[in-house]
Amino acid sequence: MRIVKEIYMTDQEVKQVYNSARWQQVRDRILIRDRHECQDCIQRLRTAAEKEERLFGEDAKIRRATQVHHIKELKENPELAFDEENLISLCTQCHNIRHGRQPKRFVKKKEPVTEEKW
Ligand SMILES: [Zn+2]
Ligand SMILES: [Zn+2]
């Protein structure tokens, strides 16, 4: 039984894609296609509207998309690297969520240890 997905690309190769002129072009095209609007923010607003839920603060608006995400992960689907169907414009926050990363601003800082002075 195989549960581990095969990885087709090395980190170095992934880097090469992101550094390529072709990627820059495709990335720009996707951002224009999506009108620089985060597609997950649009979806969040739509879902909330359907459920008649209220969103607050940052979550109530469509944030500007600054990143382009591979829906099917690039590493495992190198043939879809430049496939526009596989690409989606996202804001930083939504992109982090897609990758299961914690947004930096939610990371709790450790309490500084205060030295006692006599
Ligand atoms: Zn977003
Ligand atoms: Zn991504």
Image: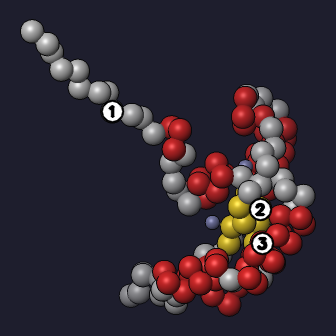
What's under tag 2, amino acid-wise? Ser
Residue annotated with mark 1: 110
Task: For the residues labelled 1 and 2, say whether their Cβ atoms are less than 8 Å apart.
Answer: no
Number of on-image labels:
3
What's under tag 1, amino acid-wise? Lys
Report x, y in % for residue 17: 64, 83
Question: Going from the N terminus, do you reach mark 1 or mark 2 first?
Answer: 2
Helix, strand or loop status at disc 3 = helix
Question: Going from the N terminus, do you reach mark 1 or mark 3 first?
Answer: 3
Report x, y in % for residue 113: 23, 26
Q: Residue at x 78, y 45 (%)?
A: 63
Report x, y in % for residue 41: 77, 48
Between 42 and 109, the one nearer to me in the picture: 109
Q: Which mark is residue 27?
A: 3
Between 98 and 54, the one nearer to me in the picture: 98
Relative to 59, is 7 above or below? below
Give the Cα separation between the discs numbered 3 and 2: 9 Å
Helix, strand or loop status at disc 1 = loop
Question: Going from the N terminus, do you reach mark 3 or mark 2 first?
Answer: 3
Between 42 and 95, the one nearer to me in the picture: 95
**Mark 2 crowdedness (10 Å alpha carbons): few <14, some 14-19, many ≥20:** many
Quarter where residue 117 is shown: top left
Say whether mark 3 is within 8 Å of ligand 2.
no
Quarter where residue 77 is shown: bottom right
Residue annotated with mark 2: 89
Task: For the residues labelled 3 and 2, say whether their Cβ atoms are less than 8 Å apart.
Answer: no
**Mark 1 crowdedness (10 Å alpha carbons): few <14, some 14-19, many ≥20:** few
What's under tag 3, amino acid-wise? Arg
Find the residue positioned furthest to the top.
118
**Mark 3 crowdedness (10 Å alpha carbons): few <14, some 14-19, many ≥20:** many
Give the Cα separation between the discs numbered 1 and 3: 37 Å
